[in-house]
Amino acid sequence: MSKKLRSEDWFGKDDKMGFVHRSWLRNQGYPDDYFKGRPVIGICNTWSELTPCNGHLRDFAEIVKRGVIEAGGFPLEFPVTSLGETIMRPTTMLFRNLASMDVEESIRANPLDGVVLLTGCDKTTPSTIMGACSVDLPTIVVPGGPMLNGRFKGECLGSGSFNWMVKEKTLVENYTAEDIHEAEIGAARSQGHCMTMGTASTMACMAESLGLTLPGAAAIPAVDSRKKVMAQLSGRRIVEMVRADMKISKILTRKAFENSIMVNAAVGGSTNFIIHLLAIAGRIGIELKLEDFDTIGSKIPLLVNLKPSGKYLMEDFYYAGGLPVVINELKKQLHNDAVTVNGKTIGENNSNPVCYNKEVITSIDTPLQNEAGIVVLKGNLCEDGAVIKPSAATQSLMKHKGKAVVFETMEDYHARIDDPNLDIDENSVIVLKGVGPVGYPGMPEVGNVDLPEKLLRKGVKDIVRISDGRMSGTAAGTVVLHISPESSIGGLLALVNDGDVIELDVAQRKLHLEVSDEELLKRKAVWESAGADGNKGLCEVLHRSCTAGTPGCRPGYFTGRLRQ
Ligand code: FES
């Protein structure tokens, strides 16, 4: 071995501190040779019973250890903050950076030479990659894998995607409470994360397309024995990466990020991809801008027929050939020379995959949609940008003008959306304020708010919705998200009133509020004098119904009360 191991600074010394570092670890029963030149591999585990999607990762850590030991390494597993999407309040996004700091400092402070990241639920992938980037050791990702397809009434049911339709199913299709109960059970019938192309699957595809996993890892279901094989091989491989000094910064080049943007478009990935990829790029020092997602990805066709953009689920995607098929279809667009964790290029890894089901993964010559990548909008309503996912939107609404129906907060929305007197129809534009990073706080996944009961009963499936919040990767609709600057810090969104006309033109990348500058200045003055001088003032303005002392309320964050 040519390069000195980082861990030798802890274990390789014959002085008092060497004694201390070795002696206490010996209480686990490690023999002498474990402290003599073996690469020490940290197994960064996001296992938690409070993160159901990662509930199997404790077992997976043992399998990774097998591989590490086989290759001559010394595995040491450590727990990090785990973020359970469906359980945490007010939203896991509030804690992603905190989790990444936990990962970063856990790696940096300990005698590790390389790291295996065990990931699953949405935020556990970006938070661990971000933390690993900041330390820049050899790193490999083991995605925990999706659940088996949900089953309900003899058909497949997508976790995540179904729950967005519960209101519609109940009102329009007369689903009973028993039906919903059956769906609840059938939606999650094995270990793993959401099996739609939601954010967790998107993040797994992101990791694979960045080159951070072994080829084909993203789509393997959590309970498939081949997932365990992949975990064991990843354990072997990380030891070799340490010996080759193959740091994560050697994988995460600008080319890798561009590849990932294109692959995300082709699989119909989540809009959350933008937020997390930008954060990873920032940590590793690669310049990446919001506009790059449109420039690089928006012209890429949709090739994968998975919910919420399409019909099938991750299990089908795996059986059809998984991400290698998609990467091969995109070979004329991708940087095929981008290096991946196994030491080969992404082109070499994915040069000859077989597609076993062309209904699930189409060829680039017969795409499901021609231009499917996330679009970045600009206009007076979003000077710093907003995004929309065309593959999940209604094509007839991609160019639309309608009158705003404004909800100042999520509480306001819940209180009034089903009011029979609400002045709303299929041409309206729902405007939801106060759900951005500061406003909620933490930018929750609420942008795809349900339609009002009276429209659902009329058979309306989608209307334009705009907000400064996010949307679950499992959701669909003509939903404009991430409006920036957000309303709570004085973005123009804060000034929209009921009845204002809003124009959305996706082809022209335009989101525009048809109100004169003069009128907007007047509204701005009123808004500021009403107390836009920080969180406290806004709390009074936006959360008039706030019940002080309600659990979850954080003074200064003006959460008002628990959301979701
Ligand atoms: Fe964990 Fe969807 S809730 S992946």
Image (spheres, rainbow, N blue to C red):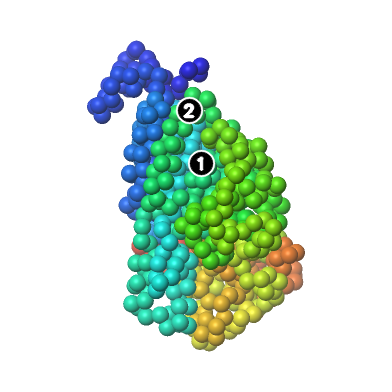
Mark 2 highlights which residue?
A: 240
Callout 2 crowding tier (Cα within 10 Å): few <14, some 14–19, many ≥20: many
* Callout 2 amino acid: Glu
Mark 1 highlights which residue?
A: 213
Q: Residue at x 73, y 65 (%)?
A: 507
Q: Earlier in the sequence, mark 1 or mark 2?
A: 1
Residue 433 lies in what quarter of the image?
A: bottom right
Q: Is residue 81 above or below residue 381?
A: above
Q: Viewed as shown, does residue 405 lie left or right of 505?
A: left
Q: Viewed as shown, does residue 517 lie left or right of 424?
A: right
Q: Which mark is residue 532?
A: none
In the orientation shown, which residue stands out farthest toward the top?
A: 14
Q: Is residue 323 above or below residue 508?
A: above
* Callout 1 amino acid: Thr
Q: Is residue 21 visible?
A: yes
Q: Viewed as shown, does residue 228 lie left or right of 423?
A: left
